[in-house]
Image: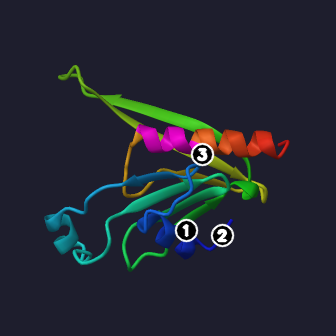
Amino acid sequence: MTDPQSILEQARRGAAPPNWRLYTKKRGKLSGLLHGSSHDPDPLLVITPDGTVEYRDDRTPPGVVRFDDLVGVELQVRGQSFSDSSTVNISVWLDLHGRDGGKAKWRPSSFGNDLQAIQGFLEAYGAHKALRGG
């Protein structure tokens, strides 16, 4: 995988290859002010054929997942409801199983339960695994 900062810069310039998926959202003025990030670029998640890079703010290093470091990914879903409501709150994340035996919970930090981003991750990881005979 290319350097994470280079991937983010290329995506921000609009020069991302067609096989990259980009997810972004406008940083809210109030949220940016409260978190001291009002002048930072908007959050950005880039999914490439080799992994993911996520920019949250200038104070936090980019979140990086390299598909070559994984042996498996499991979709996790949890629903929660209250007895006085017919509404169910759903939480979705991925359990990432590393080659080193470790396990990590992944959810795009700036995009919460964005199902399209999670679907994009699963599709890219599946393609990566298929192309590399994994």
In the rendered structure, are the residues bearing label 2 and label 3 in contact, judged by CB atoms less than 8 Å apart?
no
Residue at 55 percent across and 74 percent down: it is 6
Q: Secondary structure at mark 3?
A: strand
In the rendered image, the quadrant that contains the N terminus is: bottom right
Q: Secondary structure at mark 1?
A: helix
Q: Quadrant of residue 87?
A: top left
Cα distance, mark 2 to mark 3? 24 Å
Magenta extent? 115-121
Disc 1: which residue: 7
* Residue 2: image tag: 2
In the rendered image, the quadrant that contains the C terminus is: top right
**Which residue is most to the right?**
133
Q: Earlier in the sequence, mark 3 or mark 1?
A: 1
Q: Could you tell me residue 49's position as x and y percent?
A: 65, 52
In the rendered structure, are the residues bearing label 2 and label 1 in contact, judged by CB atoms less than 8 Å apart?
yes
Q: Could you tell me residue 112's position as x and y percent?
A: 37, 49
Q: Quadrant of residue 48?
A: bottom right
Disc 3: which residue: 95
The three-letter code of the residue at mark 1 reads: Ile
* Residue 110: image tag: none
Q: Quadrant of residue 91?
A: top left
Is 13 contained in the magenta span?
no
Is 120 contained in the magenta span?
yes
